[in-house]
Image (cartoon, grey):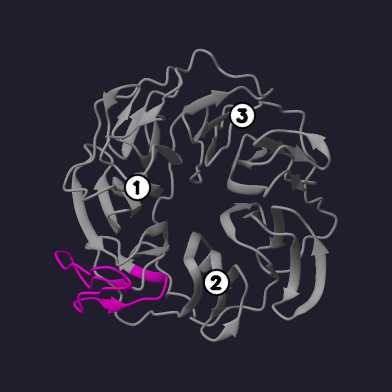
């Protein structure tokens, strides 16, 4: 679900390549509209920030203000933070409907989650949207509950939760792509589940989640699939993974040979080499790391369920309830040095969480968009979505 740029007619992908250095954003949230329920995903298309999750209102303030009726999908202008005039916001329906992931490619915005209708018409768990006007496209897949989507720049979409599949632009399943089913060992408390998808620089598909094998072959938490056949390659990440790891979010930086990963279960953020899977650094967190994005040439931003973050490699934090006392307090957001993993000592925005905290971070033009489960940022009322500039 990571952003990409297609170079010429070749399938050469530059994903999240480090840009110029910016100062980390203010810890105070901007004046933006917000939503009234949990956010799971953010995606920028042009000048619009699309928001996916489980909510029913887009509102101008935490106290109420102006409201727009929505269901699972909302959008705001990336600059003003206000609703986008004339943009239709599709409404997902069903029992406890939710949008888990969004991704844009080939002119189409894909939304995956758990729902059985959209705008009153039967659509199941995966839809395609024209982001220019917000109207739902004819795409129809009958997909299972979907946690991760990855738009193919050549058309179609990869989707995952109980397995990884590829769908044509019509919604028909691509039968040439072998469905990959994750499994876990009997001792695992997490999974099996697919939680994120991202393109590698060579066009292969990174898949992450809680798994010890794909189609019975050993592959743990992250694997690399052939984009046409679905077959996993020999690529694997190195270093210790701890107990019951869950690869929740990835950010691919081709220019730096870097795969940044947010991991739950054993709770850490890490950088691996794309070229060979080697571990560059690993930073412990006291709760799950759930979201990661590169802020600039020097820093990454990590969000999650944590309360404490190690200042450098080799330090263990314990859990939120039972910290070791060796780590620095960071309530659901932290900035790390992209090269070393060292914690930024000064940037410490206080996000008042509803248990899970931050589920999605998105960096655009020196601004940080944040989504998840929270009610305040730096003491200012801010419900579930916020922006720091």
* Labelled pair 2, 1 in contact (Cβ < 8 Å): no
Secondary structure at numbered mark 3: loop
What residue sits 40% from the left and 49% below the top? 248
Task: Give the residue pinned by disc 1.
Answer: 246
Q: Residue furthest front?
A: 186
Write the start and end of the magenta stretch as one range: 308-335
Give the crowd class for mark 3: few <14, some 14-19, many >=20 residues within 10 Å.
Answer: many
Identify the residue position indicated by label 3 in the image.
143
Question: In this view of the protein, which residue sits in the foreground, 202 or 30?
Answer: 30
Which residue is located at x 38 percent, y 30 percent?
A: 182
Classify mark 1: helix, strand or loop.
strand
Give the CA separation, mark 2 to mark 1. 22 Å
Q: Residue furthest bottom?
A: 379
Position of residue 231 relative to residue 355, above or below, is above
Mark 2 vs 1, N-terminal side: 1
Can you identify the residue that label 2 sits on? 374
Q: Give the image location of residue 199, x and y in percent.
A: 43, 36
User: Residue at position x 52%, y 42% from top?
Assistant: 147
Taking the magenta stretch, the answer to whether it contains residue 94 is no
Of the two numbered discs 3 and 2 on the same chain, state the one appearing first in sequence.
3
Left or right: 39 in relation to 225: right
| Residue 8 horizontal/vertical position (percent) | 52, 32
Which of the 4 quarters of the picture holds residue 233? Answer: top left
- Secondary structure under badge 2? strand
- Seen in the image, is 211 located left or right of residue 138? left
């Amino acid at each position: 679900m990571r952003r990409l740029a297609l170079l010429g007619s070749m399938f050469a992908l530059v994903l999240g390549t480090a840009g110029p250095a910016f100062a980390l954003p203010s810890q105070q949230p901007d004046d933006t509209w917000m939503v009234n329920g949990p956010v799971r995903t953010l995606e920028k298309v042009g000048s619009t920030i699309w928001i996916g999750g489980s909510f029913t209102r887009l509102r101008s303030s935490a106290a109420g203000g102006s409201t727009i009726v929505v269901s699972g999908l909302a959008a705001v202008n990336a600059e003003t933070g206000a609703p986008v005039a004339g943009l239709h916001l599709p409404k997902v329906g069903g029992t406890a409907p939710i949008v888990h992931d969004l991704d844009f490619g080939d002119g189409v915005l894909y939304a995956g989650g758990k729902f059985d209708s959209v705008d009153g018409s039967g659509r199941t768990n995966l839809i395609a949207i024209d982001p220019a006007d917000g109207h739902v496209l004819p795409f129809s897949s009958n997909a299972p509950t979907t946690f991760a989507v990855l738009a193919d720049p050549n058309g179609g979409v990869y989707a995952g939760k109980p397995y990884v599949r590829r769908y044509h632009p019509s919604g028909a399943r691509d039968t040439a792509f072998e469905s990959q089913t994750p499994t876990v060992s009997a001792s695992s408390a997490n999974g099996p589940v697919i939680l994120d998808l991202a393109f590698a620089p060579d066009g292969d598909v990174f898949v992450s989640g809680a798994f010890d094998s794909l189609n019975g072959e050993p592959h743990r938490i992250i694997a690399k699939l052939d984009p046409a056949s679905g077959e996993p390659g020999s690529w694997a990440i190195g270093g210790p993974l701890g107990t019951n790891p869950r690869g929740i979010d990835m950010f691919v930086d081709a220019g730096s040979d870097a795969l940044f990963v947010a991991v739950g279960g054993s709770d850490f953020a890490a950088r691996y080499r794309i070229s060979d899977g080697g571990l560059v650094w690993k930073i412990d967190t006291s709760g799950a790391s759930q979201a990661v994005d590169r802020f600039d040439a020097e820093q990454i931003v990590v969000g999650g369920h944590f309360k404490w973050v190690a200042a450098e490699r080799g330090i263990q934090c314990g859990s939120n309830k039972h910290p070791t006392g060796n780590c620095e307090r960071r309530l659901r957001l932290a900035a790390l040095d992209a090269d070393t993993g060292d914690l930024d000592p000064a940037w410490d925005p206080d996000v008042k969480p509803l248990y899970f905290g931050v589920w999605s971070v998105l960096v655009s033009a020196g601004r940080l968009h944040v989504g998840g489960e929270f009610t305040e940022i730096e003491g200012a009322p801010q419900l579930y979505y916020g922006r720091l500039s």
